[in-house]
Image (spheres, rainbow, N blue to C red):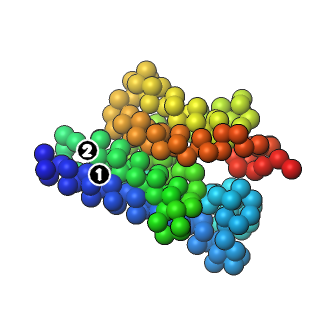
């Protein structure tokens, strides 16, 4: 039991530190000499990076943000004690999402965590990653509000996986990561959006 607790604490720390790597801030600062959080949505996100530094920079940030969730989840699923691997991976992903949203390396002002959480799902099951992306896109098109679509997606994900028979590591990862995502996106619940930008305010 003590060994499992130590592994869990270690992977939680690893997850948080990985999540706290603020690639959108670093890349935008390198390319444009600006802080990505000082304009647009005010968040360190892929869309805000695209807006300020261009599409290639945004794509690079997206890939790196996915990797921040993928790496700790993959390591936990391969190297944590066997009986507890799914739940340790889930805690690592939740910590990575929290690190992305509230990074110690950037005054606890980060992004929203969707890509990082998606990376954790990708490590557990590519199918769960695709399902989550499809649900989010569908709800964004229907609700036409990024934060509300994201909160709804997060709330539906774990029950949806259960009903669909996806009950491996993707289930606890979805459950744990969704808790952090709901908390983060509730701060934008009343934000006004336009078009399909997840964080672009109406003028």
Helix, strand or loop for disc 1: helix
Q: Position of residue 33 (x, y in %)?
A: 69, 78
Q: CA distance from mark 1 to mark 2?
A: 6 Å
Residue 53 seen in this snapshot: yes
Q: Tell me if residue 55 can be seen.
A: no
The residue singled out by tag 1 in the image is 76
Q: Extreme right residue here?
A: 203
Looking at marks 1 and 2 on the same chain, the residue that comes earlier in the sequence is marked by 1
Badge 1: how crowded within 10 Å, few (<14), some, or many (20+)? many
Badge 1 vs badge 2, beta-carbon distance below 8 Å: yes
Q: Residue at x 66, y 39 (%)?
A: 189
Residue at image location 78% in from the left, 49% down from the top:
201
145 with respect to 44 (left or right): right
Residue under the point 77% across and 43% down: 193
Instruction: Classify 10 Å Cα crowding around label 2: few (below 14), some (14-19), many (20 and above).
Output: many
Q: Which mark is residue 195?
A: none
Tell whether 51 sits left or right of 139.
right
The residue that label 2 is drawn on is 85
Residue 107 x %, y %? 53, 67
Q: Position of residue 203 (x, y in %)?
A: 86, 50
The residue lying at 53 percent from left, 68 percent from top is 106
Residue 38 relative to residue 128: left or right = right
Q: Secondary structure at mark 2?
A: helix
Q: In the figure, 101 relative to 159: above or below? A: below
Q: Quick one: 102 or 82, which is closer to the camera?
A: 102
Left or right of 35 in this view: 102: left
Question: Which residue is situated farthest in the top direction here?
Answer: 163
Instruction: Name the one closer to the observer, 29 or 135.
Output: 29
């Amino acid at each position: 039991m003590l060994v499992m607790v130590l592994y869990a604490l270690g992977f939680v720390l690893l997850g948080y530190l990985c999540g706290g790597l603020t690639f959108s801030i670093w890349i935008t600062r390198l390319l444009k000499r600006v802080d990505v959080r000082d304009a647009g949505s005010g968040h360190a996100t892929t869309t805000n990076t695209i807006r300020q530094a261009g599409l290639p920079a945004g794509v690079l940030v997206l890939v790196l943000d996915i990797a921040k969730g993928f790496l700790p989840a993959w390591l936990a699923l391969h190297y944590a004690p066997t009986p507890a691997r799914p739940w340790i991976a889930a805690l690592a992903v939740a910590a990575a999402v929290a690190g992305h949203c509230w990074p110690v390396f950037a005054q606890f002002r980060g992004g929203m965590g969707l890509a990082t959480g998606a990376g954790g799902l990708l490590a557990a099951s590519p199918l769960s990653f695709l399902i989550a992306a499809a649900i989010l896109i569908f709800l964004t098109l229907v609700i036409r509000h990024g934060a509300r679509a994201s909160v709804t997606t997060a709330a539906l994900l774990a029950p949806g996986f259960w009903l669909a028979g996806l009950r491996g590591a993707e289930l606890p990862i979805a459950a744990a990561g969704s808790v952090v995502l709901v908390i983060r996106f509730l701060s934008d619940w009343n934000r006004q959006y336009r078009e399909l930008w997840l964080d672009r305010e109406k003028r």
